[in-house]
Structures are given as structure tokens and as C-alpha cells.
Image (cartoon, helix red, strand yellow):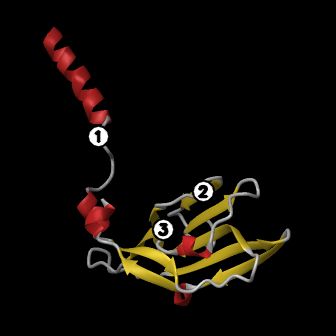
Amino acid sequence: MKNLKIFFIFFILFASALPARPSPDDFAKNFKYCLLSVRKLTLNPGEKITGYKLNLNDAYVYAAPIVPEDWSLDIGNNAHREEAWACTVSAKESHGTGWVPADYFRNFIVIGIFKPSADRPDFIPHFDMELEITVELDLAERKMLLRPKDMVFKPYPASLAY
């Protein structure tokens, strides 16, 4: 009887440690993964990039490979659509010294874009995105708004996504 109690205790502890999500293959098949880049980003002389906000619909952020030193990054993968955008990424430099060059936005984030599925014929994804980049020059701020046509979506193998 004592051995049975020990078995059940270990079983409960082990079972509670198992992840409660679909297998990686089941999850990954719903998405087309892309490494996102800005097609062409032109700054005026002396301007410095001090932040950005990325908004996504029918997509989510899989990874942010590079977070610059002295920056904060907040990723909200909100699947409940309580806001206008399903996913929002906000990033900004912390104390006026963490600006990044324009080439930071080359391969800067990996996203998963929902794709149509035979398993869910009633769900038709409508991908959309906007990237707002904040630049400063002599403490004056300017915002640049970029849309999907301004971006490069490089395929990212689903096998690397999980």
C-alpha cells in the first residue's frame, strides 16, 4: 500500500510538469514563419532610432533575435482580440544612449502568420501589420509608419520554429 501511495505521488508530480499545449508539429502547421525586415529605411542626417511599435493581426511573434543593449521590449501576443491588434510589440531605448542604426531592422523579428487550414474551414486569416519607428533629432521626435508593402518577409523554416 505504501508503494502505491508513493507511485501516485510521483505520477501526479510528473503529470503536472507536462506541457498543456499541442505538439510542436500540430501548432507549427497553422503558421507560415517569416523573418521580418524593413525593405528600405532612410533616415535624415543626424536622426537616431529610439523605438518602435509593431502591430500584427492574424500573426504572432515567435522570436525577437536581437534586443539592443539599453532597450526594453514588451511583446503582447493577445489571441483574444480585445484591442485593435492581435499582437503588439513595443520597444524603446532606455536612457538616451541606446539608439540603433537603420540596419537593425534587417531580420529583426520572427513572426508566425496564420494560414488557412482544412481543419478550420470557418477561419479565414486576414493578415495585416504596421510598424511605427520613432526617430529623434535634437530631442525632436518623428514617427515613420510602415505597412506590409514596405517589408521583406523571408521564409523561416517551421522546423526551426519549434
Kind of residue at badge 3: Ile
Residue 22 vertical position relative to residue 3 in the rendered view, above or below: below
Closer to viewer: mark 3 or mark 2: 3
Name the amino acid type tagged 2: Asp
Query: Which mark is first along the chain, 2 or 3?
Result: 2
Q: Determine which residue is flagged by label 1.
A: 18
Q: Residue at x 30, y 66 (%)?
A: 28
Closer to the N terminus: mark 2 or mark 1? 1
Q: Is residue 143 visible?
A: yes
Name the residue at 25% across, 65% down. 159
- Disc 3 to disc 2, C-alpha distance: 13 Å
Q: Gap in Å between the C-alphas at discs 2 and 1?
A: 27 Å
Identify the image quadrant of the N terminus: top left
Which numbered disc covers residue 74? 2
Q: Badge 3: how crowded within 10 Å, few (<14), some, or many (20+)?
A: some
Residue 156 placement (x, y as % from top left): 34, 73
Residue at mark 3 = 109
